[in-house]
Amino acid sequence: MIRRRLSPIISASSHFLKTKPISNPSPILHFHSFQSLQCSNPVIKNGSFWFQGIRAYSLLSLNDLKDKVPRKQKTRKGRGIGSGKGKTAGRGHKGQKARGNGKLGFEGGQTPMRRRLPKRGFKNPFSLTFQPVGLGKIAKLINAGKIDSHELITMKTLKDAGAIGKQIEDGVRLMGRGAEQIKWPIHLEVSRVTVRAKEAVEAAGGSVRRVHYNKLGLRALLKPEWFEKKGRLLPKPARPPPKLKDKVDSIGRLPAPTKPIPFFTEEEPASSPA
């Protein structure tokens, strides 16, 4: 259609160039807009071709508008001869492979590869992953003023201060790296603690409590604003399973506490009445 509209214009322009040559040997021909066939004599202005008294004509028409169609249509295999791939689309006549896709890993009835190969290794589904943090790093943050040593240092405090990363899976393990830098009493609540770290903190007059949080409780401890945003209440603290009772000291409190809980090893005997 564009070729049919441009051919009379090109022929008319060539007719003008043959009858009235331009003095300039190499003129620049500028068509500012396509013109209709009923045109007047051309006028040479600044070495270019101009048409006067003619209305502009556009190549875009309403019958040219269409939706954005992809160049390559999706192949419809096995949908008859109208799909362009033949009646059977290269799958042959009937049979198991002509019905569609088979089950993943199916090898025609023989023992599949996943059963022929031996097993290697073992993955414990009950294992826990703790993020380590050393006492030396906590001491540097206290000296920098990012952690207040007079308040209880919880896992949320360590996360907000940047002592540990944001991806905490099952809790935090307190390590003894840099234990010589702890020279004042601090109180901490973590998931696990090493023997060296516990001795160093207690030697300085502080305490370390091992608290238990499940997945939901740890999320409520580290991100309490998420529950407030969703309009939910903080979950209740979960009790540790029987296998972990000897590895923790108490249940984690929600929301994050600010004061430590004193340890009571032995109950004081009741005073006898006078």
Image (cartoon, rainbow, N blue to C red):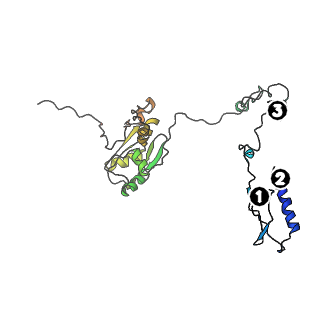
- Quarter assignment of residue 220: top left
Query: In the visual, does 274 lie left or right of 7?
Result: left
Can you identify the residue that label 3 sits on? 82
Q: Secondary structure at mark 2?
A: helix
* Residue 234: image location, x then y, percent: 39, 35
Residues 158 and 138: in front is 158
Q: In percent of the image, x 85 and y 65: which residue is there?
A: 16
Q: Earlier in the sequence, mark 3 or mark 2?
A: 2
Q: Earlier in the sequence, mark 1 or mark 2?
A: 2
Can you identify the residue that label 2 sits on? 3
* Residue 72: image location, x then y, percent: 77, 43
The 10 Å Cα crowd at callout 3, few under 14, some 14 to 19, many 20 or more, is few
- Quarter assignment of residue 24: bottom right
Q: Is residue 108 above or below residue 128?
A: above
Q: In percent of the image, x 20 and y 31: which residue is there?
A: 270
* Residue 74: image location, x then y, percent: 75, 38
Q: Earlier in the sequence, mark 1 or mark 3?
A: 1
Can you identify the residue that label 1 sits on? 34
